[in-house]
Amino acid sequence: MNDSERSNKFIVSTLEDLIPVARALIERFGNRTVVLLTGELGVGKTKLVETVAREMSRETSSHEAEVASPTFAIHQVYNLGTNRRIDHFDLYRINSEDELETVGLWDVLTASNGLVFIEWPEKLQPSGRMSNNSKFCVPGWHIIDVRLLQLKSGAREISVSSSC
């Protein structure tokens, strides 16, 4: 089974349960990867990015990456050591195509390589780069869809699949 056909589902009840999810994501990362994080407010999108950054920084350096929610800054950069970094965008507060153009996402995606997390990717719709009938695709970039759903039990169901 190739990566585009592979999907995973995880049930997460504790922060420690995020570690296997983070590791499964890390296994999929290439030189140019975008991770689209979809889920309701407070479901754990930023915690998942934090766990990925922590696991990656353990592999590449002696310090842990500092991760903060980019909700108000919209874009955060986490340096993981050895020339690796994560660009983390939270598009929750984006309300127009003009705002979307100013956050720097398209500049990051024209770089030769990188790892980009995008919370609230449905906000990309106004730009015409994503619509209800098509997936977000950027030529030369591997796209991973991560959907987080809060269950009645309080646990989260996290589905990971690849597209484009």
Image (cartoon, rainbow, N blue to C red):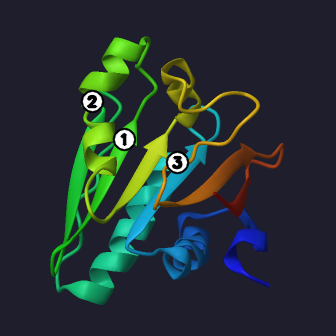
User: Is residue 119 or residue 4 the one in the foreground?
Assistant: 4
Tell which circle, 3 or 1, labels the residue nearer the N-terminal end: 3
Q: Which residue is mark 2?
A: 103
Q: Would you say 71 lies left or right of 78 here?
A: right
Tag 3 secondary structure: helix
**Does residue 27 appear left or right of residue 151 in this picture?**
left
- Identify whether 17 is placed above or below 161: below
How many residues crowd mark 1 within 10 Å: few (<14), some (14–19), many (20+)? many
Quadrant for the N terminus, please: bottom right
- Residue located at (64% from left, 54% from top): 145
Disc 1 is placed on an element classified as strand
Seen at 52% across and 18% down, the residue is 126
Residue that carries the numbered disc 1 in the rendered image: 89
* Real-space Cα separation, disc 3 to disc 2, in angstroms: 19 Å
Q: Amino acid at mark 2?
A: Val
Give the residue drawn at x 27%, y 30%.
103
Determine which residue is flagged by label 3.
Answer: 45
Coordinates of residue 4 in the picture (x, y in percent): 71, 70
Asked if labels 2 and 1 touch by Cβ distance under 8 angstroms, the answer is: yes
How far across and down, in percent of the image, does residue 77 sit?
22, 52
Outermost residue toward the front in this view: 139
User: Considering the image in quadrants, where does the C terminus appear?
Assistant: bottom right
Nearer the camera: disc 1 or disc 2: 2
Q: What is the C-alpha distance between the residues marked 1 and 2?
A: 8 Å
Front-most of 83 and 78? 83
